[in-house]
Image (cartoon, rainbow, N blue to C red):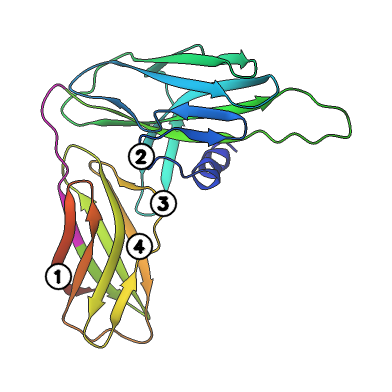
Amino acid sequence: MLNTQVKMAFFMLALCITCDPAGAGQLEVSPVTLDMPNGTASTVLTVVNRGTERTGIQVRGFTWSQSTRDDQLSPTRDLLISPPIAELNPGETQTVRILLREPARRIEASYRVLVDEIPAAGSPSTVRLSLRLSLPLFAGPAERTAPDLQWQVVNGPAKLELRAMNRGTRRERVTELAVAAAGLGTIKAQLLPNTWVLPGAERHWTLPVRGEVRSAQVQVTGNSDSGPVNAVLPVLRAP
């Protein structure tokens, strides 16, 4: 049940793109990407009630890992959140302090902070929906970290699979990924608005094509936080 609820958080609100405030219902939070760089062990989240009614919030921390296609969250005691629950009057601001119990070592640690809105009880005929924000939190070690994305394109029955493997020690964010080849045209990968590849993780995207791809190589283009993606790769055969 928890995994289902956690997955829903990613699809309800994919807001973690910039450092601008993000809103969920009556709530506004900033920043939308939380960072503990260079071995630091604390950060602050600001929550503002922009609505006209009193509302409550619950803030929880989870470890964040990735499989080839999905994100997994697991409850954790690594993060100390204060306060974990609060109520805000209209226009009121709540500062939430987040502490890391143990510093990250060698590789950047990845977490998700879920902020749930808890609306005040309404009349029996009123339906109130609570909303959720899922915010990434990255805790860096004292040592320097850097992403190292490696790419593969694998040919299978009536599809291409684009694979990104992060062999580095820091996350990487990718956008506008596409694969192009002679006789194939350009096929764009279907990405969420904010797509991360965590250190040590591997992500796969299926690119539908008609028939078997006969090109010996393809060009992968796109953007990342580290700069443009532009690679010419051989087409591998699926086992």
Distance of label 3 from label 1 (alpha carbons): 25 Å
Q: Which mark is residue 193?
A: 3
Q: Amino acid at mark 3?
A: Pro
Q: Amino acid at mark 1?
A: Leu
For residue 219, side relative to residue 33 (left or right): left
Residue at 41%, 18% in the rendered image: 77
Q: Which mark is residue 233?
A: 1
Q: Position of residue 155 (x, y in %)?
A: 28, 75
Question: Dividing the picture into quarters, in which one does residue 234 lie?
Answer: bottom left
Q: Position of residue 151 (x, y in %)?
A: 19, 60
Q: Nearer the viewer, mark 4 or mark 2?
A: 2
Residue 182 versus residue 97 in the image, above or below: below
Query: Would you say residue 176 sits in the magenta stretch?
Result: no
Mark with earlier residue (3, 4):
3
**Helix, strand or loop for disc 2:** loop
Q: Nearer the viewer, mark 2 or mark 1?
A: 2
Q: Which mark is residue 205?
A: 4
